[in-house]
């Protein structure tokens, strides 16, 4: 595991809800850009809550202590790196591993009692020690320890006996294998050809000797695109229903993985998972870990589970057994407390879908099932009032899920939704209570942002569909894989669409989907049209630069740490370079003055990634999936009258320098293409229009269509 660098700095656009509950799953999950659902995807998504286990013969034995002193830097499962231990000295600790209290059945039964539906264990962590019997190295739990038994095999069999699905964690880096050098502080190291072959051999063993594997949880390393694809294909060939984690890199995973102990405050249109530890400080056993109050910790992790499920994800909660194989009592108590809650309230978690509401609520979260809404009260609603905005439907009854007793709430319908008034004596207290709202019939949550004819639809008023894209963990960013809009027109209305695009999109093929009916369009028949207004009247100020800063692609560092400096050259020069290290970002800013509101096209050259802000609002972000030395892009900017501030980050991941430029002196023209008429076939007044790339390389790959404008007549 590694510290997350996923950004929290952006003002995130929320996903807007679908009109009907029956369409919610299609909007949130089947929006994986026309890709066919993986064979194991539905079963994997149904798990919701799983156990993660970090258990290693060496690091669990050490328990975060080296030579009698606690190692306070880094995670305890990475003690070899943080204590700077010689490899032979570290390896010798395996001779102490006897694990007399390890019992795979007790682990499986604990997971069941905790309400978890699957178990994922570390088959091999970064230290390279295998907790399974492998023919590739004697550095494994059977051949190198007095314990002499296959931990992975025992747990796989126990999970099968007790009706749990079983998955495996596999580190792509290996601090023991000689051909796995170099080893860096980032853990995102290149994989040599010899190391890649070694990984493939071990993965083949794991997928052929241990029964059905629900997920293969790859971690760290920096594969080439070909290596990532080869490993994903290997997994799917050996076990078609095994889901592959996104940390395989290069958009080759089946599901996205959030940063450690992190979950989004927006919804993601692809399968995703949050990995979490009982403690923020470590995943492996730490003998000197401070525990705190078990009730408070259980409440914290339960809130995280609920928030993850309400946003459409799965929650993977870790324990770190001791070197003797026993589970830390504090961790066991946390799991069992939440297992008791799930016994009473599990209907609101298992099989539940994400909230259909666009807004978040101060009192808690929402999950849904057909005909039911579940309101998770994380705190007392202010004044005992709960308002569900833009909700249209009739509630038959409201009960407390834990005992199915009526709550005695009053329901008031208004033009903007419904208000539920809880009785004066109703108290949430220290527990998390769930209200079950049983519906009297169909219901809908009306969309907030609606366009009417004639409509201009572009990135500024679109609802984005998000995933996560990146070459490796440290290059991951939130990608936009599709965009949609809601039109309010009568059912059966014939629409006359026109698409306008720039040289950036010319020649691309897109799918335009209206009420679920798709047509593929190649953007190659557009007629040139000049930008309206007077782009030549726009005044561009000199460029100033700031950097470098160590950061992720979509991080925004504190740029006050360094002074802004005038750039002495021409910002439009194609030979501009920043000398950089991996993970360095340079910022370039220019003031733009427009006599009136004006659109302008700007050409950019960038390296491994680029972020563009105009007047503080994010306009575009993209990475470099093919790892080219330079990328060319065009962006349509909508200038306001007077002064505008353009801020661009040029980011490096793999190269010794970053090429960059920003050039407003490019042809100020777009292309306009008439499209075939389409019919709003859906029932009712609201109709969805969606645009996405046709046949994308990956469901996670950014659409890179920033300048498309749809006109609907």
Image: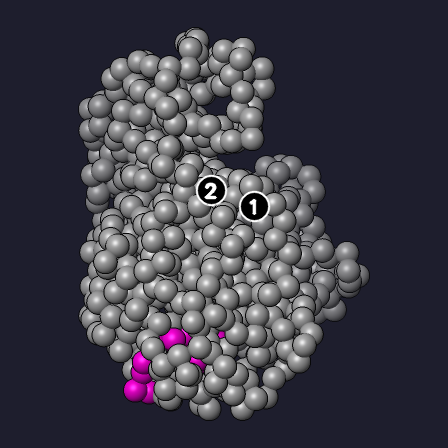
Q: Main secondary structure of the magenta part?
A: loop
Report x, y in % for residue 657. Answer: 60, 76
Closer to us: 582 or 401: 401
Which residue is disc 2 drawn over?
A: 337
What's drawn in magenta, residue-wise?
Answer: 124-136
SS label for mark 1: helix
Q: Quadrant of residue 194?
A: bottom left
SS label for mark 2: helix
Q: Is residue 157 magenta?
A: no
Closer to us: 234 or 532: 234
Closer to us: 336 or 308: 336
Which residue is disc 1 drawn over?
A: 294
Give the mark count.
2
Report x, y in % for residue 209. Answer: 23, 74
Report x, y in % for residue 331. Answer: 51, 53
* Residue at (67% x, 77% y) in the render: 68
Q: Earlier in the sequence, mark 1 or mark 2?
A: 1
* Residue at (42% x, 49% y) in the render: 315
User: Is residue 23 toward the left or the right of residue 455 in the image?
Assistant: left
User: Is residue 65 toward the left or the right of residue 338 in the image?
Assistant: right
């Amino acid at each position: 595991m590694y510290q997350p660098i996923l950004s929290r700095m952006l003002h995130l656009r929320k996903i807007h809800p679908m009109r009907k509950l029956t369409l919610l799953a299609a909007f949130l999950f089947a929006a994986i850009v026309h890709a066919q659902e993986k064979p194991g995807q539905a079963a994997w998504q149904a798990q919701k809550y799983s156990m993660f286990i970090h258990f290693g013969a060496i690091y669990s034995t050490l328990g975060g202590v080296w030579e009698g002193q606690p190692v306070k830097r880094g995670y305890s499962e990475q003690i070899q790196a943080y204590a700077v231990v010689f490899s032979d000295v570290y390896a010798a600790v395996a001779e102490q591993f006897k694990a007399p209290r390890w019992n795979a059945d007790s682990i499986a039964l604990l997971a069941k009692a905790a309400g978890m539906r699957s178990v994922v264990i570390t088959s091999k962590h970064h230290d390279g020690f295998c907790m399974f019997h492998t023919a590739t190295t004697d550095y494994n739990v059977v051949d190198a320890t007095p314990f002499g038994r296959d931990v992975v095999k025992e747990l796989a069999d126990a999970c099968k006996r007790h009706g749990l699905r079983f998955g495996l964690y596999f580190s792509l880096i290996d601090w023991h294998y000689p051909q796995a050098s170099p080893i860096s502080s980032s853990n995102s190291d290149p994989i040599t050809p010899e190391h890649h072959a070694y990984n493939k051999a071990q993965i083949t063993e794991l997928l052929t000797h241990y029964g059905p594997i629900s997920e293969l949880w790859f971690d760290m390393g920096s594969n080439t695109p070909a290596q990532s694809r080869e490993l994903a294909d290997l997994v799917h060939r050996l076990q078609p229903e095994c889901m592959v984690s996104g940390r395989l890199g290069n958009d080759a995973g089946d599901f996205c993985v959030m940063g450690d102990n992190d979950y989004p405050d927006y919804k993601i249109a692809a399968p995703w998972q949050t990995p979490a530890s009982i403690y923020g400080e470590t995943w492996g056993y730490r003998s000197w870990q401070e525990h705190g109050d078990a009730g408070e910790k259980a409440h914290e992790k339960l809130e995280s589970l609920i928030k993850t499920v309400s946003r459409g994800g799965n929650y993977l909660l870790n324990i770190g057994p001791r070197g003797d194989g026993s589970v830390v009592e504090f961790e066991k108590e946390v799991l069992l407390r939440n297992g008791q809650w799930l016994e009473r309230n599990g209907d609101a978690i298992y099989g539940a879908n994400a909230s259909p509401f666009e807004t978040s609520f101060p009192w808690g979260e929402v999950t849904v099932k057909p005909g039911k809404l579940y309101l998770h009260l994380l705190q007392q609603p202010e004044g005992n009032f709960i308002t569900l905005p833009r909700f249209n439907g009739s509630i038959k009854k409201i009960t407390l899920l834990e005992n199915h007793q009526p709550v005695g709430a009053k329901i008031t319908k208004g033009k903007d939704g419904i208000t539920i008034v809880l009785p004066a004596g109703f108290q949430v207290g220290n527990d998390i209570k769930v209200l079950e709202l049983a519906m009297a019939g169909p219901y809908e949550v009306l969309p907030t942002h609606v366009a009417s004819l004639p409509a201009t639809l572009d990135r500024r008023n679109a609802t984005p569909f998000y995933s996560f894209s990146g070459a490796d963990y440290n290059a991951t960013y939130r990608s936009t894989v599709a965009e949609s809009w809601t039109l309010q027109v009568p059912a059966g209305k014939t629409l006359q669409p026109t698409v306008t695009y720039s040289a950036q999109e010319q020649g691309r093929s897109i799918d335009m989907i209206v009420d679920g009916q798709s047509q593929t369009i190649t953007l190659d028949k557009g007629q040139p049209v000049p930008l309206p207004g007077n782009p030549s009247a726009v005044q561009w100020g000199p460029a100033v630069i700031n950097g470098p800063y160590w950061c992720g692609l979509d991080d925004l560092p504190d740029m006050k740490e360094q002074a802004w400096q005038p750039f002495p050259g021409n910002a439009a020069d194609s030979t501009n370079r920043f000398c950089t290290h991996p993970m360095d970002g340079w910022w370039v800013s220019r003031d733009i003055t427009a006599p009136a509101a004006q659109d302008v096209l700007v050409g950019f050259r960038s390296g491994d990634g680029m972020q563009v802000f105009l007047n503080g609002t994010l306009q575009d972000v993209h990475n470099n999936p093919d790892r080219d030395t330079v990328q060319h892009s065009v962006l349509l900017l909508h200038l306001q009258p007077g002064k505008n501030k353009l801020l661009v980050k040029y980011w490096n991941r793999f190269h010794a320098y970053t090429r960059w430029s920003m050039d407003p002196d490019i042809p100020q023209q777009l292309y306009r293409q008439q499209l075939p008429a389409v019919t709003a076939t859906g029932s009712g007044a609201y109709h969805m229009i969606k645009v996405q790339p046709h046949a994308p390389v990956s469901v996670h790959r950014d659409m890179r269509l920033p300048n498309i404008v749809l006109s609907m007549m």
